[in-house]
Structure formats: structure tokens, C-alpha cells
Image (cartoon, rainbow, N blue to C red):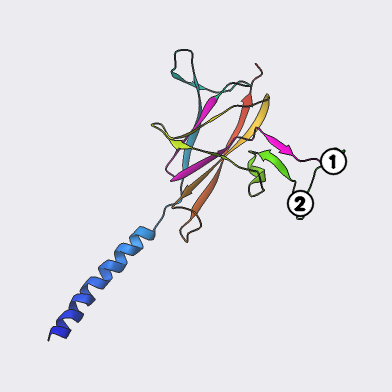
Amino acid sequence: MKKIKNLIIVGVLAPFIFFSCLQEDIVPVPTVQGIQLYMTDIEGNDSLISQPTVNKTFRFVVDTDADIATVWPGGERRIVKKVNTETDSLDMFGHPVLIVSDYYMDYGLVKARGYKTALGETGWYTSYTYKESGEFNVNVVVTNHGYSSADYKQVVHEAGTVTVLPE
């Protein structure tokens, strides 16, 4: 009798246990609502800007529902040159050997990285300074539910181009 009672209890509770586990495994794909640029003015207040200036620090602010966001501003890309030549140094797979890069097209190469962000009141933010004027492609990589798990969801958002003005 006791054995039958225990089997009934297990039979009733088992679906609830599996159902709750399945709900935790449903991870939504992250979305990016927008990206804005802010610069601190003379009074210490944040001002929304449309075009940053060379050698002036500003912030990228990413409005997203993701767990993690990384900004690839595309402002710096330096390749190792072969000794005494202007030829790029290549690795054994034919990829350029980088000194540093924040271009998303270099994603996965050694020394290529996006900028980690911190969560603020208005979204995920990171500070950046462009060293030269021009137009740069900005990408944002947003991720939900950690790294290298079965539920890893990552989205690459092309934020467009940023025009950087000379001083």
C-alpha cells in the first residue's frame, strides 16, 4: 500500500518538475532597439550627439533586452607588417596578424575585440575615442543566456555608420 502511494506521488509530481525545467530553458533571441551617442558637456551632464569629434571621449549607449552587449566601433585596425616591407603578415590560415582591431569583420581573429559594456540607467554603455576622422561601421553583438551552452543566443546588429568630425 505504501509503495503504491509513493508511486502515485511521484507520478503526479514528475510532470511539474519537467515542465518547470523546460520553461527555464526557453531563451528568447535578444533584440536591439537602438544605439545612441552621448558626450559629457562642460557642466558634467550627458548630451546626446549625432557625430563625435576626433580625440574626444564619448559613450555608446545600447538599448537592448540582452544579457550581454559588446560594441565594435570600427575605429582602429592595425596589422603586423613583414620585416622591412609594406606587406601584411599572414598566419597559416591566410588571415592577417593583428596588433589590435575593433572592426567586427575581424571577429574571431587574435587581437580583435569589441568593447565590453556596463549596464546603466539608459542601457548598456561603453566609452570610446576615435583617433581619426571619417566614417566607421559600428556593430553591436548581443547575447542571451551565457557562453557556449545549448541555449546560447547571439545576434549581430549592424548599427550603421558613424561620421567622426575633425577637431
Task: Label 2: state its secondary structure.
Answer: loop
Query: Which secondary structure type mostly characterizes the magenta part of the structure?
Result: strand
Q: Residue 51 appears in which quarter of the rendering?
A: top right
> Which badge, 1 or 2, is on the more N-terminal residue?
1
Residue at image location 63% in from the left, 24% down from the top: 164
**View extreme (left): residue:** 1
| Residue that label 2 marks | 91
Q: Residue at point 75% right, 46% down?
A: 96
Q: Which mark is residue 158?
A: none
What label sits on residue 83 in the rendered view? Answer: 1
**Residue 67 image position (x, y, % from top left):** 43, 46
Based on the displayed image, in which of its 4 quarters is residue 141 positioned?
A: top right
Asked if the residue under mark 2 is in contact with the one under mark 1, i.e. CB atoms within 8 Å, the reply is no
In magenta stretch: residue 1: no
Residue 23 point in image, percent of width and height: 34, 60
Q: Nearer the viewer, mark 1 or mark 2?
A: 1
Mark 1 lies on a secondary structure that is loop
Vertical arrangement, residue 38 with respect to residue 92, above or below: above
113 left or right, relative to 39: right
- Residue at image coords 47%, 61%: 150
The three-letter code of the residue at mark 2 reads Asp
Magenta residues?
58-81
